[in-house]
Image: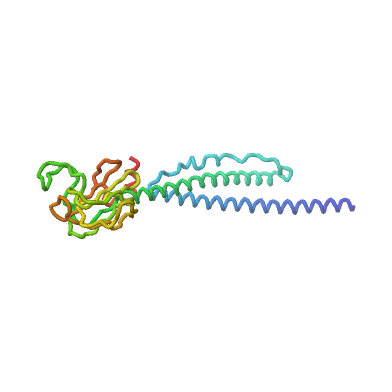
Amino acid sequence: MIHFQQKLAQTNNLIKENTLLKEKLLAVSTEIDSILTRLKLMENWEDEIRSEKKLKAINKDLRNMGIGGYPQIDSTFSFLGEEFSQSYNLTLFKLRQLEGKINFDFNTHRELMEQVKLKNLLYRNTPSIYPTYGRISDGFGWRKHPITHKRSFHHGLDFANKIGTPIYATADGVVKKTGREKYFGRYIIINHKFGYQTKYAHLSKYIVKKGQTVKRGQIIGFMGNSGRSTGAHLHYEVLRYGRYRNPYKYLNKSEDDIVLSKRK
């Protein structure tokens, strides 16, 4: 009789432990589901940012690669019954899913931050705003020179306004050179990243010096009539890897326009 009571007590204890183990396993499984749901929200957030920033979307098949299929059978707790064994194997499967998603999402989030950082750097270093206020008095290309009256190629844009009108750096960069010459008068040359260079000429005054770091939108000088000029204006040039580009195409460029043109 005593032996039977001992066995019964042991059985009851095992039942209680089994029940407690099931409850803990269910709690773990529920928490995994909660984390997977939050990861899905983060993935949706990442997709929205990629769409907003015009960055390449993550392939859904690639994102789900290695986390599908069926739970692998682990017989470690088969002695506790089929129901518990199935719950245990399903929880293990969810853990592997969670591990795979965390590793994948960590890498894609890191890549996203690097791409956004590069895009911002590209935007800040690409000429993309008007260098001054005023009307465009002469465009980029072949023209009849206003002084010599000969046909010649104009490598920039001319903006006409009053002497003393502020001149702005059109992108982040470093001042390569300032000076004065017969043709351009007082001028500034700024080097930017990604092969860009800008030139600002016929100034009345420049307020930056060689080697100085400048920011997009910073005042660097003032419009003038110095050099060979028929009136107060700014001569503005944009070069990329030493080749003249039409500055008009860079006026008021959006961040997305800049990134799209960089891919071409």
Q: Is residue 94 left or right of residue 127?
A: right
Number of numbered discs: 0
Instruction: Between residue 218 and residue 44, name the one nearer to us.
Output: 218
Q: What colouring style does the render use?
A: rainbow
Q: Position of residue 6 (x, y in %)?
A: 85, 52
Task: Please give the name of the residue rendered at 32% of the width and 54% of the height, measured from the top-left corner.
Answer: 216
Task: Please give the name of the residue rendered at 12% of the width and 52% of the height, measured from the top-left corner.
Answer: 230
Kindly give the residue lying farthest to the left in the view shown. 149
Q: Position of residue 69 (x, y in %)?
A: 57, 39
Quarter of the rendering occupied by the C terminus: top left
Q: Is residue 96 left or right of residue 193?
A: right
Task: Please give the name of the residue rendered at 42% of the width and 46% of the height, measured from the top-left corner.
Answer: 115
Q: Position of residue 94 (x, y in %)?
A: 59, 46
Kindly give the residue lying farthest to the right in the view shown. 1
Task: Please give the name of the residue rendered at 78% of the width and 53% of the height, measured from the top-left corner.
Answer: 13
Q: Is residue 222 left or right of residue 31?
A: left
Location of residue 242 with respect to 187 vertically, above or below: above
Q: Position of residue 100 (x, y in %)?
A: 56, 44
